[in-house]
Image (spheres, rainbow, N blue to C red):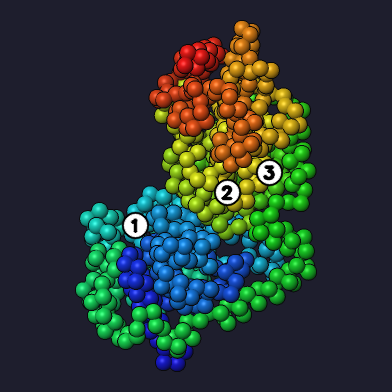
Amino acid sequence: MTANVSPQDLANAIRALAMDAVQAANSGHPGAPMGMADIAVALWHRHLRHNPANPHWLDRDRFVLSNGHGSMLIYALLHLTGYDLGIQDLKQFRQLHSRTPGHPEVDVTPGIETTTGPLGQGITNAVGMALAEKMLAHEFNRADFSVVDHLTYVFAGDGCLMEGVSHEACSLAGTLGLSKLIVLWDNNGISIDGQVQHWFAENVVQRFMAYGWNVMDAIDGHDESAVHAALTQARRWAREGRVDATGVLRFAPTFIACKTSIGKGSPNRAGTAKAHGEPLGAAEIELTRAALGWPHAPFEIPQEIKQAWDARAKGSAQETEWDALFASYQAAHPQLASELMRRMKGELPANWDQTVDQLLESVIAAGETIATRKASANALNVLGPATPEMLGGSADLTGSNLTDFKGCGALRASQTSFEFGRHINYGVREFGMAAIMNGIALHGGYVPYGGTFLTFSDYSRNALRMAALMKRRVIHVFTHDSIGLGEDGPTHQAVEHAASLRLIPGLQVWRPADPVETAVAWVEAMEAEHAPSALLLTRQNVPFFTRSETQLEAIRKGAYILRDAAEAKAVLIATGSELGVAMAARDLLASEGLMVRVVSMPSTTRFDQQDAAYKANVLPPKLLRVAVEAGVTDGWWKYGCAAVVGLDRFGESAPGGVLFKTFGFTAENVADTVKEALRRAKAH
């Protein structure tokens, strides 16, 4: 510690910047930054291993502010420790195009590891980060070369722990023994509506003990030395483990319960809901300055406090030390070093193009009539072994989603053992799985994918949205994509889900019609470095379609002409399993002398990204259009359709074939719909 600068001085710098920025913006949440300032000093000043000059240093500790509404806490820390975030950035808090948005956003502010704000997801992302670190360490570390060896720290509030996703993730983290995950709970007892004891009265400490975590209770969150001691112990447990009462050495995450007062320092707002989400006000800020003994002007930090906070020299030395270790590792294990760096950069293997060619050649040669979920499994059996960063899983539906592949092995980690595998059994935790996969992708080194039924994408939806917002390569395998799944009935039959997923900006949605389109969808998902993807797959078998080389290449554009006709009178647009129905309808119409074009549209989101000329070539303005999809019709009218054969109601419990006939997904009904649409058009 710099002479004459105390931990309290360092904490008060955070408090002052937080209340000043929120006041300047006339918007924000000063309470959490002010209440957690002492905890932040203990972690960021004494323990966090990071380099402000290089926020992307591979072996840095990860820090997640799960209670992201307290964003001025991390912005103050980034500014004070020397990141490229100046005082003018803090003055632009919550303003248009600033680098200090209302909630932390990855790739907007240097040093932010994940976008947080939707409570519970930050701590869940952190579980993914800690899992990625543990797996990469197993893959790449060698004797005397621990090149992957960092901790993941989380600040979390009451709201994060109320959200159910935190239960899903923290339960799994305890089971998997993620000892390098350390969570500090801001136990201030206040949320927007007031004192949480009226709606959040569980024993949180016992809850985390039940998960199998190491727990430290009743730490005074305003005693920096007490938090420092707790972190010191947690770091020791992280790497050395902890012997339990039976004498067994266990490795588990650590939960530190820190008792704090929200808005600490404010004479009239501390400890109340008024400190949570609104500016303190000019008068209260003056009183707070006096109470803290902080006589400085708004946004003014004394030079000696700046110097005490500055972490650039220490961080540079830590990274330089790691660089020397990595150089020795590189000399001893050049192939491992090269592979680690490739994967952390997000680059696909050098033989990727050959692997893709092998996949497509094998699929075309097989020409199988199979379910697209099975076609997906076949694709994984080619891509998985050739692409070691692919990390799969399922929310307790592996045998239905078919998301494992030959030789992948199942991850079997516990508090006492670790067996590496590239398939994760997430259990019945769809939301947790999706948010953990986001954390894995954010950490780097793996391309995560996971499976569940399409109808359960609703459970995952906000994590899907966050993946799209953060532009991270995360792949969701959603099987049982329509009424075609049959007897499980409307609770499991997706109707509105494809349409709703297509509404998420940046999410690449693929509903392939056969094995070839399924293989292309997988390739596109893997190559989409800055976008998540959703693959919507059938339970039932679908026909195989032959294609020219030109058509094969055009699949990547999201829609293409599968079968054309001279003097076509209409275009049939179909996706997924309904493409077979559309092709059969085409044949029926042709037998009556009515020629139509059939367009397969496996990805409306990708097709919408094409230029106007390509769109007009596939869907000529002069041709009447009829769409066919076993789902809600709303999304199809934007393509200028005269009619849509769809399903604007929930399904029924019956065999899939019966349901397709019952709801009109037959060649006869589609053909009749085309004829009726042409009749109406002619009449007008």
The mark that comes first in sequence, 1 or 2, is: 1
Displayed quadrant of residue 122: bottom left
Q: Which residue is mark 1?
A: 159
CA gap, disc 2 and disc 3: 20 Å
The mark that comes first in sequence, 2 or 3, is: 3
Q: Which residue is mark 3?
A: 384
Relative depth, front residue between 136 and 309 = 309
Marks 1/2 in contact by CB < 8 Å: the verdict is no
Q: Which residue is mark 2?
A: 531
Residue type of the residue flagged with mark 3: Gly
Labelled disc at residue 582: none
Relative depth, front residue between 155 and 557 = 557
Q: Would residue 167 be found to the left or right of residue 307 on screen? A: left
The residue drawn where x is 72% and y is 26% is 547
Q: Secondary structure at mark 2?
A: loop
Q: Secondary structure at mark 3?
A: helix
CA gap, disc 3 and disc 1: 38 Å
State which mark lies toward you, 1 or 2.
2
The residue drawn where x is 34% and y is 75% is 20
- The vertical placement of 397 against 96, above or below, is above
For residue 499, say whether it is visible: yes
Residue type of the residue flagged with mark 1: Gly
Q: Would residue 178 be found to the left or right of residue 161 on screen? A: right
The residue drawn where x is 47% and y is 40% is 503
- The vertical placement of 581 against 141, above or below, is above
- The vertical placement of 536 against 238, above or below, is above
Horizontal and vertical percent for residue 336?
Answer: 74, 60
Mark 3 closeness class: few <14, some 14–19, many ≥20 residues within 10 Å: many
